[in-house]
Image: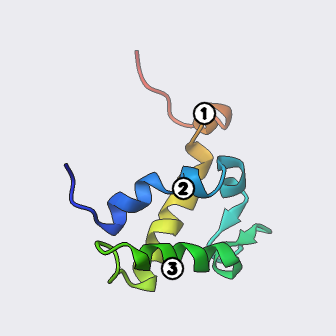
């Protein structure tokens, strides 16, 4: 079993928090006419939840931001998105 770290905890959280369709329309800063995650109340809720977990209590705001940003950047490739926008394909 993996130790509970911010990275491990975060990998299971996004589907519980918001849909992929919302993630595609969101960035941390709101660039490109997208919604800014840092201005959403959801950010506060997420940070409070992380602080309640004993294993991730000491996670910095910057560490949380890095995990959220990483997830939002890859959201377009989730749920078949890479096939739709013509990204790299697996070779047979």
- Numbered badge on residue 48: 3
| Secondary structure at numbered mark 3 | helix
Q: Nearer the viewer, mark 3 or mark 2?
A: 3
Residue with the mark numbered 2: 14
Q: x, y percentage for residue 52?
A: 42, 77
Q: Distance between the residues labelled 1 and 3?
A: 32 Å
Q: Is residue 55 found left or right of 18 in the rendered image?
A: left
- Numbered badge on residue 56: none
Q: x, y percentage for residue 66?
A: 45, 72
**In the figure, 82 relative to 67: above or below?**
above
Q: Which residue is drawn at 35% across and 68% down?
A: 6
> Which class describes the residues within 10 Å of circle 3: few (<14), some (14-19), or many (20+)?
few
| Secondary structure at numbered mark 2 | helix
Q: Which of marks 1 and 2 is in front?
A: 2
Question: Which color scheme does this rendered protein use?
Answer: rainbow
Residue with the mark numbered 1: 80
Q: Which of marks 1 and 3 is in front?
A: 3
Identify which residue, 89 or 6, lies in the foreground: 6
**In the figure, 7 relative to 36: above or below?**
above
Q: Distance between the residues labelled 3 and 2?
A: 15 Å
């Amino acid at each position: 079993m993996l130790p509970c770290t911010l990275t491990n905890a975060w990998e299971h959280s996004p589907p519980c928090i918001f849909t992929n369709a919302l993630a595609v329309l969101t960035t941390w800063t709101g660039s490109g006419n997208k919604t800014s995650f840092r201005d959403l109340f959801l950010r506060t809720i997420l940070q409070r939840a992380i602080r309640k977990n004993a294993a991730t209590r000491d996670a910095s705001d910057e560490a949380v931001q890095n995990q959220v940003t990483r997830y939002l950047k890859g959201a377009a490739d989730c749920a078949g998105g890479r096939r739709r926008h013509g990204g790299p394909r697996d070779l047979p």
